[in-house]
Amino acid sequence: MNKNQNLKIRPNYKTLAMIALFGLAGCNKYEYKNVVTGVGKKENTRMILLKDVETGDERIFLRDPGWNSCVDLYSDYDYIELDDTVTVVVGGMLSDRYYQYTKILSPENTGGDVGLRYNQDTINARKVRAVFNNECNKFNALKQNLQNDKQK
């Protein structure tokens, strides 16, 4: 096979091709940086009070674990604490409008596509620490029961 050694693609065409690919791959996701100013739980619904870094607007983020009944993929939200920085990600055709005009962010209010992004390493460390503390408490209770039984 004879290869054409002189065939070169101009850099301008490469740039145009990359812009077109990124335009096609984009899915209209909008991201807004927020600070957690309150955390709560009512029945099974997690409520997180957020303050937008740019505008100062406060919003409530609601996530019902029953929304995905098979597996609670949102159990990480239990480990979000005050003053954590999170990014609200909303998607869909009108996602920017939903975020701007809705004070309560939930799947029902935003067309179903809203979520939080956070520092996963911090959340994982908090999870592991909570599991460790829980196991230590169980062990200490078991140890105390054994000592009490031994004294009888």
Image (cartoon, grey):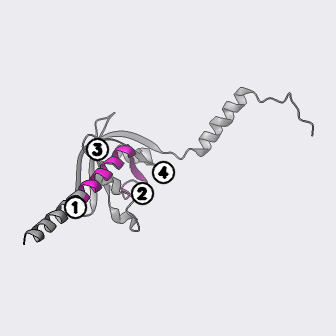
* Callout 2 amino acid: Gly
Spatial CA span between label 1 and label 4 = 49 Å
The residue sitting at 39% across, 51% down in the picture is 115
Instruction: Please tell me the numbered disc located at residue 139.
Output: 1
SS of the residue at dot 2? loop
Instruction: Please tell me the numbered disc located at residue 112.
Output: 2
Sequence order check, earlier mark of 4 and 3: 3
Residue nearer the viewer, 108 or 6: 6
Residue 104 seen in the current view: no
CB within 8 Å, label 2 to label 4: yes
Q: Please identify the quarter of the rendering in which residue 147 is found.
A: bottom left
* Callout 4 amino acid: Gly
Sequence order check, earlier mark of 1 and 4: 4
Left or right, 23 with respect to 46, comes to right
Instruction: Please tell me the numbered disc located at residue 58.
Output: none
Look at mark 4 in the image and give the residue it sits on. 92
Q: Please identify the quarter of the rendering in which residue 11 is found.
A: top right
Q: Which residues are magenta?
A: 106-135
SS of the residue at dot 3? strand
Sequence order check, earlier mark of 1 and 2: 2
* Eye-nearest disc, 1 or 3: 1
* Callout 3 amino acid: Leu
